[in-house]
Image (cartoon, rainbow, N blue to C red):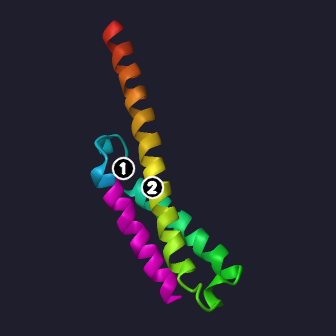
Amino acid sequence: MLSLTIVVLAAAAAGFIVWANDKRHAKYGAGVPAGVSVAVAALAWIILMAAGFGYLPGRTWIPWVLPIVLGAASATAAAIYLGRSRARQDTERLTAILRA
């Protein structure tokens, strides 16, 4: 369980770092990339541990590193998608308001 705790904390940190570095981070909440990152990392850890990767000599690093990488990648994808879509929606709403 210590490895899950470390994975979750590292994934949350990666999610907050992704949020802080996104230029459109005002379009969505700070917890969104961190939450996505933690959810993906915890699910990946559970799957890898259930598959037995935590007990293979020479491969015990996989459940420690891979979930963090997957979590950071998913946080980045969520930030890119949400930032673009929310900016587009905000622009459309502002244009509709200015036309009326």
Taking the image as shown, residue 7 lies to the left or right of residue 90, namely: right
Q: Mark 1 = which residue?
A: 29
The quarter in which the C terminus is drawn is: top left
> Residue at position x 31%, y 47% from top?
22
Label 1 sits on what residue type? Answer: Gly
**Position above or below: 50 against 14:** below
**Disc 2 crowd, CA 10 A, few/some/many (<14, 14-19, 20+):** many
Q: Mark 2 = which residue?
A: 75
Range of magenta residues: 1-18
Label 2 sits on what residue type? Answer: Ala
Q: Quadrant of residue 54?
A: bottom right
Q: Quadrant of residue 80?
A: top left
Taking the image as shown, residue 90 lies to the left or right of residue 7, namely: left
Separation (CA) of disc 2 from disc 1: 12 Å
Q: Are marks 2 and 1 in contact (CB under 8 Å)?
A: no
Foreground tag (2 vs 1): 2
**Disc 1 crowd, CA 10 A, few/some/many (<14, 14-19, 20+):** few
